[in-house]
Amino acid sequence: MFDQEPILFDLTIAENIAYGLENVPMEDIINAASKACIHQFIEQLPQGYETKVGMKGSFMSGGEKQRIAIARVLIRRPKVLLLDEATSAMDSHNEQIIQEVLEQTQTEDPSRTLLIIAHRLSTIRSCDLICVLDRGHIVESGTHTELIQRHGIYYKMHVQNNL
């Protein structure tokens, strides 16, 4: 699971990415960071992957924390991945990059199930199935195109977002 408020520990960036795993090769850590679009940022830090993030990641911005946490998830190669507002602290450019990364990881392992909880419609636009909730109940479901064609709640949210 990946939450909108990622938890980072007062450890190095490398240790945070590999947290809970043993004997992780640095190559795997770098690969996960690259996929999460945080590698270049890390490389620019004076201590690189050995940089301490501070208590709860206090030395990092919200978007940097989210990308480190995404790298932590990606290094595990989970069969089921739940993303709860995973890109909420990112600007639209970085959100798009992460979307492309998620699509690529899905292509690499088509058996992976990816569940995305999001308020930003751009986050879910390419999903195979979108379920629209209203007061805890599914009121619409389908692809982006199908939901737009129905002119229901999803369509109204889409129109509001594009104003």
Image (cartoon, rainbow, N blue to C red):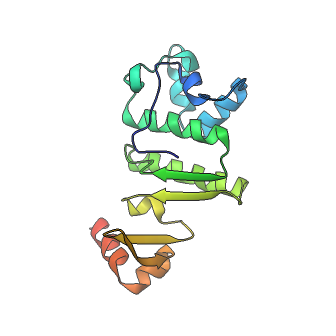
Q: Is residue 34 left or right of residue 120?
A: right
**As drawn, 40 above or below 11:** below
Image quarter of the C terminus: bottom left
At a point 37% along the width and 31% down the height, the residue shown is 61
Q: Is residue 1 left or right of residue 20?
A: left
Q: Residue furthest top?
A: 47
Q: Is residue 118 left or right of residue 83?
A: left
Q: Is residue 108 left or right of residue 3?
A: right
Query: Count the marks: how many?
Result: 0
Residue 107 horizontal/vertical position (percent): 69, 57
Q: Residue furthest front?
A: 136
- In this view, the residue in front, 48 or 85, is 85
Residue 39 horizontal/vertical position (percent): 57, 31
At a point 27% along the width and 69% down the height, the residue shown is 160
Determine the image quadrant of residue 72: top right
Residue 149 horizontal/vertical position (percent): 43, 84
- In this view, the residue in front, 110 or 97, is 110
**As drawn, 124 above or below 21:** below
Q: Residue furthest bottom?
A: 150
Residue 19 horizontal/vertical position (percent): 59, 28
**As drawn, 69 above or below 13:** below
At a point 40% along the width and 26% down the height, the residue shown is 56
